[in-house]
Amino acid sequence: MQSADSQKPPKRSRRDGSPRTPPNTPPADTERSPSPDLHPDHRTWGPEQVCSFLRDCGFSDSGLLERCREKKITGSILPFLDESLLEDLGISSYGKRIKLLNNIQQLDQTHVYTMKVINDPIHGHIEFHPLLIRIIDTPQFQRLRYIKQLGGGYYVFPGASHNRFEHSLGVGYLAGCLVRELSEKQPELQISERDMLCVQIAGLCHDLGHGPFSHMFDGRFIPLARPDVKWTEVGNLYDMFHTRNSLHRRAYQHKVGNIIDTMITDAFLEADPYIEITGTEGKKYHISTAIDDMEAFTKLTDNIFLEILYSADPKLDAARAILKKIECRNLYKFVGETQPIGQIRIKKENYESLPKGVASAKPSDMVLEPELKAEDFVVDVINMDYGMEDKNPIDHVRFYCKSEPSQAIMITKNQVSQFLPEVFAEQLIRVYCKKTDKRSLYAAQQHFVHWCLINNFTKPQDGDIVAPLITPRKLEWNYTHSAQSPAHTREASKFKAQLFPDDSV
């Protein structure tokens, strides 16, 4: 005679942390098996087969069956029905809802899900539930293969060739690991398998709305093409936010990567009226309007760059010329970088007028050729922070200690380290010149440094080199050490007056 254990299906090996399928061992109080007339895999059922299953389970109310047909309840949806959804379908009796849930649960227990294993370059072999695979295999998700994660950053960092597809797979996997850990560590939350799948779906699908070249499309192109559309642990945690800020400085907001994004944006704006993308029912859309139609947007990927570049249409000459400059590395020239001083920030509604300000900042006592206009400048304003503008994000985090794991506590910054930042946000202002000849660049540098001077911005790092006749005009810019500056001297005197009001020392 076989033991009870020998009748159990063998355990399937899995990678630690991977979300698991529901247990395959049926409960002792088995309710009912599907009718032999129904396909054994309930995922293949349409609404009519679901109605047959309901009748087999004793639910023959014509109103219930009609509502299932109207809402197109299929076999793949059945496992995700909960008590409240069954009540919405018209099953008012609590006992009947529980009975049907037990029958639905039996479907999952009589069918062993085949998990799909994907070899991820970061996480190794990871498993995905068949429902997630069905999402991954849609044209909308596969489209992410053709959108680079870092947009124009690929033209700066040749290794930054990864795309939104592989990134989204990793996020879906990590989302499953996180919710599985919560379920195991905090069973009182009663997180169901349905909840876990929903969290994984959210992780998988979080990037489906990205356009060509990722944030370039929604952050630069759409606001200009369609301004009316809105598209869109303690020490370790401080390290994480610092790393995030460093990545933005060195990679995501790289000065060359950003100007390439700007040039692609300029090319798309030039091409937008002439590019046609076929959408639902054959309707034609442009680059900027494809976001209004799912079929058209699904066709909109990074490949639009090559479509413009290799087009022979004379209407695309201006856009093609810009993209050819990118290909030949003839980029807009970086003029310099500065910052507002103190708590002053440039407001978003004023960004558009900044090139005009730089163009009008020509030093009156200098003869500069050629004459530069507002359209010759690009001013890129970058807001860097720890994720919550000027606030410390750790102030909004609660921690648990081993001695009392159920009590949340707050830990202040001075309890952690004296080396932590005092300011959590800053604004960088970068200026570029579209004219790339040496004389134009020299003139642009004089405009820029003088613009910084009259607006009381920080002195550009190379200001003394590129504009040696302008930087001496501002007193605060001419001290080797900040402690020698008049502003610092005034603050020190004020501090001394507060400490020693009687001037006893």
Image: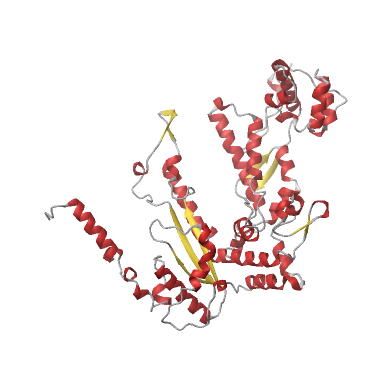
Write the residue at 72% across / 64% down.
273
Write the residue at 11% across / 54% down.
504
Write the residue at 85% across / 27% down.
38
Quarter of the figure with residue 29: top right
Q: Is residue 95 left or right of residue 151?
A: right
Pick the front one: 369 or 106: 369
Q: Is residue 346 left or right of residue 326?
A: left
Q: Is residue 39 visible?
A: no
Q: Is residue 304 above or below residue 462?
A: above
Residue 492 position, x and y percent, is 24, 58
Screen quadrant of the C terminus: bottom left
Of all residues, the one furthest to the right in this rendering is 37
Residue 498 position, x and y percent, is 20, 52
Q: Is residue 243 above or below residue 404?
A: below
Residue 184 position, x and y percent, is 56, 29
Q: Is residue 376 left or right of residue 327?
A: left
Q: Is residue 337 left or right of residue 170?
A: left
